[in-house]
Image: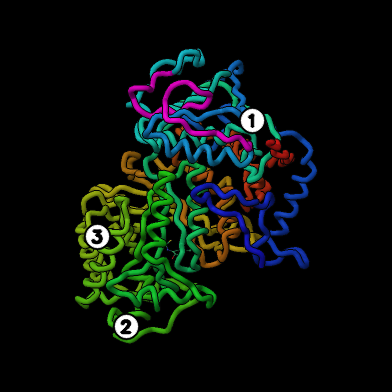
């Protein structure tokens, strides 16, 4: 099968050619001889081709996903990016400015140098409170005037577009980065082209003041059921960053594979990493691979949350180290998709030495504050031993200095400082979880019947599971994290996460097919104020993302619920010869 050569945003930006149509690296068949969802994608491509001669649709201020908090358009203030534009930035914003320039250079062909100053220039990124006043000549709107830093917080930003330039103001580099992603979406769709394209690079005038609703906004990638190379993970980070998500949860261990090198227990990766669902050769991340993922994510203001799933989902570990198994006999390697049969021996002290070593090494490699202990589906462990095991394991994680995260099955265990439960139920009536919250836990919401990206979209979706039902993009969007679990107050909700389990997902194109368009729906629930929640409006803002994905070479499910517009033609330009 062909592989999608589209690369993650490498450092520096790739200069090579990327495809301008979705890859067809997808399985299953629904039309004779045509792989699906390739068939679905082909239908969408035909629609796009019909519109190929139309010019790029102008973007309206506020036509952004996730919806910004405050949008004040000024039709008199449109700005057009020109070949001589310079990005002016104060020192702390330099890295964000370099990344923004990296997104804009391939399609525009403009040099877009980054200059170290906060003054003047058509594209200005301002970071420090001292130089955060809105420039003279900024739009005369209610939002004009000095920026209220307390209101912007850690990730908020303000974007001012006038005929004279664009200014992004934030208190932190993370806020500046979120604002830069907004600016990217305000440029016409061909800005996503990997090759130089002729277009008027207009940005709609006005002011956006924006900040997130929830502090934790994430997605999970299961690299255990199928292993994905580092490059694929980096590309997922790019997708998260585009939609202002700030956490990537990596499900690093499961029955079918152990994917992270642990020096003190080397067979975990060497033996436990050599399998995957379906019998492939699997794989695992070296410490350097993992460091690379973490650093790439950090540059995009995304925090990696590593998960070591315990005490169940551990067949791969037991194959590598039979002394961890209750019967002290190595089970055969497992490449199926059942759950709940394996567990490490909660009655053996060697198990706790193993847990301490593993969480110690993973914590040391992880700059973020979280360590996810799993805890789900340990069906074979009696409730008492489960609880005793989890309480010790939670303390071992706390001893590394990390905050415990775990699936909501951890709820009955005692509270440890800061503990966060990830709720994946399908019925918001969950007294055990509500009780854990009363004892101090906070929640990340991943309701299986709304946020699970491994669920099929429709009965004929060629890959995916359906135990939590079908999840089309509207279902992904139509729920409220703040009120979803009975007895859990909004203040206890840390945020949202969309998990992608990969029993049926085997390639980068398939990852993207399951992510898009549902990931942006979950991202909007995490970021946007509830007052902006409105399906018809979301649907039309989401529709405008389709041509961007097509041009960027991102595979997506062309949901029939969304009025996808045609993709504008990308008109190549010849570089001006120099003599
Ligand atoms: C349940 S959700 C699981 C996973 C499976 C998933 C498939 C959770 C914590 N456990 O082991 O991969 O269903 O949808």
Between the C-alphas of marks 3 and 2, the distance is 23 Å
Q: Main secondary structure of the magenta part?
A: loop
Q: In the rendering, which numbered label is found on residue 335?
A: none
Is 325 situated left or right of 540 in this image?
A: left
Dot 2 crowding, Cα within 10 Å, few <14, some 14–19, many 20+: some
Question: In terms of image quarters, where does ligand 1 lie?
Answer: bottom left
Residue 48: x and y, percent?
74, 45
Indicate yes or no whether the magenta region holds residue 124: yes
Is 237 situated left or right of 295 in this image?
A: right
Q: Which residues are magenta?
A: 108-134
Instruction: Provide the residue designation for mark 3.
Output: 397
Q: Secondary structure at mark 1?
A: loop
Q: Kindly give the residue lying farthest to the bottom in the view shown.
A: 329
Q: Secondary structure at mark 2?
A: helix
The reply to whether residue 60 is in sight is no
Instruction: Provide the residue designation for mark 1.
Output: 201
Is 466 situated left or right of 178 in this image?
A: right
Between the C-alphas of marks 3 and 1, the distance is 50 Å
Instruction: Provide the residue designation for mark 2.
Output: 322
Dot 3 crowding, Cα within 10 Å, few <14, some 14–19, many 20+: many
Quarter of the figure that contains the C terminus: top right
Question: Is there CB contact under 8 Å for labels 3 and 2?
Answer: no
């Amino acid at each position: 099968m062909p592989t999608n050569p589209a690369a993650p945003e490498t450092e520096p930006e790739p200069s090579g050619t990327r495809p301008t149509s979705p890859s067809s690296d997808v399985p299953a068949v629904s039309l004779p001889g045509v792989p699906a969802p390739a068939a679905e994608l082909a239908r969408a491509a035909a629609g796009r081709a019909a519109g190929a001669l139309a010019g790029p649709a102008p973007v309206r201020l506020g036509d952004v996903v996730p919806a910004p908090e405050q949008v004040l358009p000024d039709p008199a203030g449109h700005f057009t990016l020109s070949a001589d534009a310079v990005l002016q930035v104060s020192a702390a914003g330099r890295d964000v400015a370099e990344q923004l320039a990296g997104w804009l250079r391939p399609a525009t062909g403009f040099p877009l140098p980054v200059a170290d100053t906060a003054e003047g220039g058509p594209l200005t990124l301002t970071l420090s409170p001292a130089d955060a006043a809105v420039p003279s000549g900024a739009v005369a709107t209610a939002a004009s005037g000095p920026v209220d830093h307390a209101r912007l917080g850690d990730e908020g930003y303000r974007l001012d577009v006038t005929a004279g330039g664009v200014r992004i103001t934030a208190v932190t580099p993370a806020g500046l980065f979120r604002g830069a992603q907004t600016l990217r979406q305000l440029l016409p769709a061909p800005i996503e082209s990997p090759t130089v394209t002729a277009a008027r690079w207009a940005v709609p005038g006005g002011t956006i003041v924006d900040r997130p609703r929830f502090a934790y906004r994430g997605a999970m990638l299961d690299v255990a059921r199928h292993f994905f190379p580092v490059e694929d993970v980096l590309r997922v980070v790019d997708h998260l960053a585009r939609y202002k998500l700030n956490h990537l949860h990596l499900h690093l261990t499961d029955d079918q594979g152990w994917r992270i090198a642990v020096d003190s227990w080397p067979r975990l990766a060497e033996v436990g990493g050599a399998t995957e669902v379906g019998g492939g050769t699997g794989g695992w991340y070296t410490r350097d691979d993992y460091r690379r993922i973490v650093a790439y994510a950090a540059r995009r203001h995304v925090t990696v949350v590593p998960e070591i799933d315990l005490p169940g989902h551990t067949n791969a570990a037991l194959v590598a180290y039979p002394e961890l198994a209750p019967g002290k006999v190595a089970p055969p390697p497992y490449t199926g998709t059942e759950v709940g049969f394996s567990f490490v021996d909660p009655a053996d002290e060697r198990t706790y030495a193993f847990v301490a070593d593993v969480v110690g090494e993973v914590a040391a490699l992880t700059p973020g504050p979280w360590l996810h202990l799993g805890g789900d589906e340990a069906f074979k462990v009696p409730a008492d031993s489960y609880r005793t095991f989890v309480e010790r394991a939670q303390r071992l994680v706390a001893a590394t200095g990390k905050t415990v995260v775990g699936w909501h099955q951890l709820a009955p265990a005692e509270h440890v400082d800061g503990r966060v439960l990830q709720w994946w139920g399908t019925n918001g009536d969950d007294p055990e979880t509500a009780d854990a919250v009363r004892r101090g836990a906070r929640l990340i919401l991943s309701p299986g019947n709304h946020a699970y990206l491994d669920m099929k979209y429709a009965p004929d979706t060629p890959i995916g599971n359906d135990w939590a039902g079908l999840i089309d993009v509207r279902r992904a969007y139509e729920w409220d994290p703040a009120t979803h679990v009975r007895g859990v107050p909004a203040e206890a909700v840390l945020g949202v996460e969309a998990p992608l389990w990969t029993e049926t997902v085997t390639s980068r194109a398939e990852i993207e097919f399951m992510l898009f368009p549902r990931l942006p729906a979950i991202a909007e629930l995490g970021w946007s104020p509830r007052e902006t929640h409105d399906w018809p409006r979301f649907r039309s803002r989401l529709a405008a993302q389709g041509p961007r994905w097509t041009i960027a070479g991102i595979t997506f499910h062309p949901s029939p619920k969304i009025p996808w517009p045609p993709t504008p033609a990308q008109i190549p330009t010849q570089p001006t010869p120099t003599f």
